[in-house]
Structures are given as C-alpha cells and as structure tokens.
Image: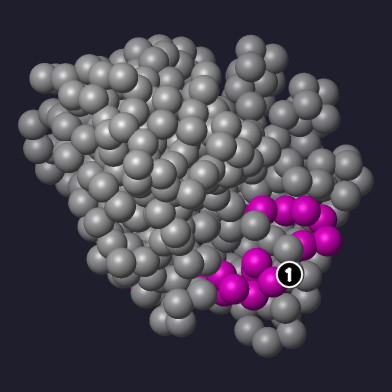
Amino acid sequence: MTSSPTTVSVLRDVRPWGGERSDLHVADGVITAVAPHDAAAPAAGAAGSDGVVDGGGLLALPGLVNAHAHVDKSWWGKPWVSYGGEGGTQGRIAHERAHRDELGIPGVDVTLAVLRESVRTGTTAVRTHVDVDLGVGLRGIEVVREAVAALGGAVHAEIVAFPQDGVLRRPGVLELLDEAAAAGAEHIGGLDPASIDRDPVGQLDGLFAIAEKRGVGIDVHLHDGGDLGAFQIELMIDRTLRAGLQGRVNVAHGFAVGQLAGSRQADLIAAMGEAGITMTTVAPIGAAPLPLLALRAAGVPVGLGTDGIRDLWSPYGTGDLLALTTQLARLSGLRYDEDLVTAARVASADAARFVGREVHDLVVGAPADVVLVDAENVPDAVVRAPRRALVVAGGRVVARHDEVLV
C-alpha cells in the first residue's frame, strides 16, 4: 500500500446512476445530501486531504453487493493450485476436504486476499457462506470475522453458517449450525436436502427449527433440478409460511426454476413471491438461466454472487461483480436499456436485503458506499464493466485506480 484511506466529507461532481452531475455529502459514513454539483465550490485539496474528493464527472453506482460468496475457501494470492479430484458435488466436497488444510483454508490471510481483491473491483458488502462441519467446527466463521475486521469497514459482511458436507448425514452438524446461530451468524445454510441428505423433509425441518428458535435466516444451496428441485422449493414455501419467516428464506442456485416450463414455472414463481422467498444466482454458464425478469415481476428478489473464487472447486473467478453482471445480463438475454439497468440494480441497490440493510443506494440515509466508473450511462457500464476509478465504503476511499488502500 502506498496511500491511506481518505475520509470523505463531499464526493463532488459525480453522476448517480448516470443522471445529472451531483455532489454527495457524507457524515459518519452515511450520505446526508445529494445536491446539484456546485462548480463554484472549492476543488478538492491534495489527495482529498480536506475530505472533498473530486469525482471528475464519472458515473456513480452504489457499492456492489456480492450476495453469494465463499470467502473462506479461496486460494487467491497463493501459487497456482491445479484442478484435481472428481467432478460433481460429492466429488468436489471430497477433494476439498482432502486438500484444504495444506492450503491453510480457512485462514485469515487467504480470506483477506480475496476480500481485498473484491474491494478493488467495487464490492463493499457481501453475504458469505462459511463452512461449518465436523472438521473445522466454527473456526471458519471466526476467521472470516477477523479478516473483515482487519479491513476496517471496507466490506460489510453477513455470514451464513454453511454445512458443505451435508446436515443429517453427518451427525452433529445440526448442533453446530445451532451453535453458530446462537453465536451471531445471521443465517444458517442447507445443501440439496434430497440428493445430499436423501431426506428433504428431515433436513428442512431441522433448519427451520433452528431458524425459529434463534431468529436467523435460512439460505439453502439447491442444485437439484427439474421436478425434484421444484418439490424441495415447495417444501420451503410451506415451511416459510407456517413459521412466519417471509423474507428470511433464500434459495441459492435453484436451477430447477430455470428448467421448468410454462405454467409449472409460473405457478412456482408466484408461490415463491407470495411466501417472500428470495433467490441468489451466480450466473453460471451452461445452466438454464433463471427467468430474472419474471422472478422480479412476481416479487421474488434476486441477488447476484460470485460463488467460490479460485478455490478447490474451480480455478475460475475473479471477484469482479460488475463483470459478472455483464455475464448475468448476457445469459438472461437482456438488451433493452431498462433491463440492463435492472441488472446493475440486482448487483447493487436492490441487494440491500441480502446483507441486512434497509437501503443501499445513492440516496440520503444510505451507507456512503460508492463506485465510480468512466462510462456514458448505466447500460454502457454493464456491457463493458470498465475499470473502477474509485471505491468508497462507509465514507472512506478504500480503492483508487486499482490500488487497494486497506
């Protein structure tokens, strides 16, 4: 690091969402005013030393929100790790369990490395799944919390205690999830209740019992496709309504939703909307894309996330959520300007709920999380994913022209 973060009092001459040039006033890490740009006001001091930072008329977006990450798993920053082991969910679990220790996973250093790379490309908030199993216990959660704290507010994080190796098939994991929830994890996770545990009713009953007792959310990885996947979503809908957990249950991946056709898909989406169930996607290549616009029209919020980044599951991933937004838009067949803006909102402002925020936008009362890019408008930013010129998180400049300042 060659510089240090600047605390912002005014972020001047920026174009929120591609609109008119404006000055964002900031106090205590929160946007306090969005005013028309005052060209007559004094310019910023050297390196913004007076708290006034010049945006140079660049396009401003809210900080990007990674709604589905695994920051405890990455080997980012280490020498190249060649892909190995068997494919498929079971094969990747086995390979990860066999080799994670030799890579220091979970570890504060590797988690810090991937988080700093995410900050560099504009991510300021994340919902991260953290492995909780009989091998690591709750250590991974402690590691992630330590890494987030070391960044001093550059990233806001919520944690999902995630049973990557299964729930019921590993006696003691439900108890670990309960301990994690009692210790402050905001959500507990699940994994393919049918194909992994082969007891969808049992796994979901166990998860919902903990959620009701501890007041936490539920976030289930669901790779099972077709009618099998749809059946499990229907089980979640029923339990969500009975437990009064509307708005607290998320289906991650949910490939089945994209695979269903006609009225079967429409009916399931409508039921999810009525139950307040949300979805997160990682915009995977090769899978049937989620019907993004139909989900949003039915009141099903959708979040975008990176999944794993250079981990023992796959060597792919950069942490660049804006580039992933480009991929989401292309896979979803989005071409109209208003739909491209929707993609940008999925990756930022509309993802507030996935990280426990009431508002995450360029408005008064929102956290001062801002990303500046040199783009004509939001559609241009989505299709090009240009370099991030400036990243502000919690009212501090945390990255500038590819240099991370935390």
Please state which of residues 112 and 38 is positioned toward the viewer in this rendering.
38
For the C terminus, give its image quadrant: top left
Q: Is residue 123 left or right of residue 198?
A: left
For the N terminus, give its image quadrant: top left
Task: Find residue 196 and report its horizontal and vertical position in percent.
Answer: 55, 47
Q: Is residue 366 above or below residue 182?
A: below
Q: Is residue 98 above or below residue 387?
A: above
Q: Determine the secondary structure under disc 1.
A: loop
Residue at image position (51%, 36%) is: 127
Residue at image position (66%, 21%) is: 181
The number of callouts visible is: 1
Q: Is residue 355 left or right of residue 51?
A: right
Q: Is residue 36 left or right of residue 387?
A: right
Task: Find residue 136 and report its horizontal and vertical position in percent.
Answer: 43, 17
Of the residues shown, which amino acid type is indicated by label 1? Ala
Inspect this view and state whether residue 395 appears.
yes
Q: Is residue 24 left or right of residue 294?
A: left
Residue at image position (13%, 28%) is: 78
287 within the magenta span:
yes
Question: What residue is pinned by disc 1?
Answer: 298
Packing grade of label 1 (10 A; few <14, some 14-19, many >=20) is: some
Magenta stretch, residue numbers: 273-297
Residue at image position (71%, 45%) is: 249
Inspect this view and state whether residue 311 appears.
no
394 within the magenta span:
no
